[in-house]
Image (cartoon, rainbow, N blue to C red):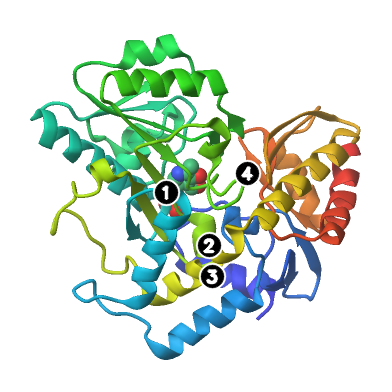
């Protein structure tokens, strides 16, 4: 099929929920994507932070295909080795005590919300159910996670009524204090607001929120769906802030290209969700877990993580010399670029024509390259992006 045929087939049959660029990707290797005419693009998106080992990583593909030939799915009524192995690896690597596996970031956050409410209910009884989230946050598209998302533009009247129990505040400790009441059970935050515009939280603010939460026995939920699994140069982004949350959610990069979500919690919360309290038909799928185990083994390595950090600094240094680059935000390989006189959307559209794929985050250009991108791929991609940003 050619691009026009694929586009026509999609548009005649798929709900028009996505605004798509004029591009269909046929295949890829590393950080290089190929379209249906054989044209190559440097991919600075990794499928919005998912393909953290790039396209068609040999080891990941081998782990997934071996598992597909062995056991593709069993229900969660039975024990399963790849699933058990992944939860063990996750808890060993992060220091959290227990993990629940689902299929997406939104599902991981749904689990976190249920877990926080149940923990509070079991300890304090009814009425302590409110989750405080930050303005300009993003936590997902299910009704709860959409409501937890602190962006009015994503709460149109057509989807009402929205679930109750969510409160928003600014990235300011007084605003958090004002939002806390005797109904509060948790505060939920991203360490770097991704969809909200690549906005890293201030370290002092995060420490103050955590101290306040500890004092009031309010749980801290860190949404690491976008920032987790090596993206910032640490396995988990909150390590950059020196905090110990009660609950952490993961997705995207953990799967390396297959759908997964994980909700991790401390020992104190570890037995809160008993049998029947939560579940997922596909959660912990053996094929997905085999791939995720491989990802975790690769990424949770000091040399791998320091290369992510170094490559992030290298990209930032190069970008800062580009004409029209007004500011650069983010950490590691999560990079937001504010371009003088151009919106992110303008740049991204033009960049595709120039052979490089990027993302937007509000008005910024956002880069989430594969974590193992090579120097050559970075240089070629930046050379192509430079022309667009500087013109
Ligand atoms: C911080 C954060 N949380 C949650 C989500 C939702 O993840 P998913 O699309 O896998 O449901 C996203 C997706 O972009 C995200 O960036």
- Residue 355 is left or right of residue 135, and the answer is right
Q: For marks 1 and 3, give the CA distance.
A: 19 Å
Tell me which residue sits at (62%, 58%) in the image: 301
Marks 4 and 2, the one that precedes in the sequence: 4
Instruction: Name the N-terminal-most of marks 2 and 1.
Output: 1
Label drawn at residue 95: 1
Asked whether 44 or 126 is in front, the reply is: 126
Mark 4 = which residue?
232
Tag 2–tag 3 contact (CB < 8 Å): yes
Q: Mark number for residue 296?
A: 2
User: Mark 3 vs mark 4: which is more N-terminal?
Assistant: 4
Q: Report crowding for label 2: few under 14, some 14 to 19, many 20 or more residues within 10 A (C-alpha).
A: many
Real-space Cα distance between discs 2 and 1? 14 Å
Report whether 342 appears left or right of 84: right
Q: CA distance from mark 4 to mark 2?
A: 15 Å
**How far is mark 3 from mark 4, CA to CA?**
19 Å
Q: Secondary structure at mark 2?
A: helix
Q: Position of residue 16 (x, y in %)?
A: 48, 56
- In this orientation, which residue lies closer to the viewer: 170 or 296? 296
> Residue at the spot x=65%, y=42% of the render?
360
Q: Quadrant of residue 87?
A: bottom left
| Residue 231 point in image, percent of width and height | 61, 48
């Amino acid at each position: 099929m050619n691009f026009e045929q694929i586009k026509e087939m999609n548009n005649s049959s798929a709900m028009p929920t996505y605004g798509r660029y004029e591009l269909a990707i046929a295949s890829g290797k590393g950080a290089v994507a190929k379209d249906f005419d054989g044209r190559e693009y440097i991919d600075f998106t990794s499928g919005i932070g998912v393909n953290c080992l790039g396209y068609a990583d040999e080891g990941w593909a081998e782990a997934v295909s071996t598992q597909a030939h062995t056991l593709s799915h069993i229900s969660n009524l039975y024990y399963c080795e790849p699933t058990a192995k992944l939860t063990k690896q996750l808890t060993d690597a992060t220091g959290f005590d227990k993990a629940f596996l689902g299929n997406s970031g939104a599902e991981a956050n749904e689990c976190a919300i249920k877990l926080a409410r149940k923990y509070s209910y079991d300890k304090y009884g009814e009425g302590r159910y409110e989750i405080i989230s930050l303005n300009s946050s993003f936590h997902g598209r299910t009704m709860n996670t959409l409501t937890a998302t602190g962006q009015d533009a994503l709460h149109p009247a057509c989807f009402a009524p929205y679930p109750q129990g969510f409160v928003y505040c600014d990235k300011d400790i007084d605003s958090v204090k004002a939002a806390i009441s005797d109904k509060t059970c948790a505060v939920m935050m991203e360490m770097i607001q991704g969809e909200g515009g690549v906005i890293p939280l201030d370290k002092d603010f995060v420490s103050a929120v955590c101290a306040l939460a500890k004092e009031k026995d309010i749980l801290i939920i860190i949404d690491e769906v976008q920032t987790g699994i090596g993206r910032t140069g640490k396995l988990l982004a909150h390590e950059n802030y020196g905090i110990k949350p009660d609950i952490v959610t993961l997705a995207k990069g953990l799967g390396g290209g297959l759908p997964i979500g994980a909700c991790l919690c401390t020992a104190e919360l570890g037995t809160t969700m008993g049998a029947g309290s939560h579940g997922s038909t596909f959660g912990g799928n053996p094929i997905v877990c085999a791939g995720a185990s491989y990802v975790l083994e690769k990424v949770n390595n000091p040399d791998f993580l320091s290369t992510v950090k170094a490559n992030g600094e290298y990209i930032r240094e190069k970008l800062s010399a580009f004409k029209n680059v007004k500011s650069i935000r983010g950490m590691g390989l999560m990079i937001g670029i504010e371009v003088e006189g151009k919106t992110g959307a303008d740049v991204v559209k033009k960049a595709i024509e120039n052979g490089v794929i990027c993302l937007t985050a509000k008005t910024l250009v956002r880069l989430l390259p594969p974590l193992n991108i090579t120097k050559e791929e970075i240089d070629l991609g930046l050379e192509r992006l430079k022309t667009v940003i500087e013109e």
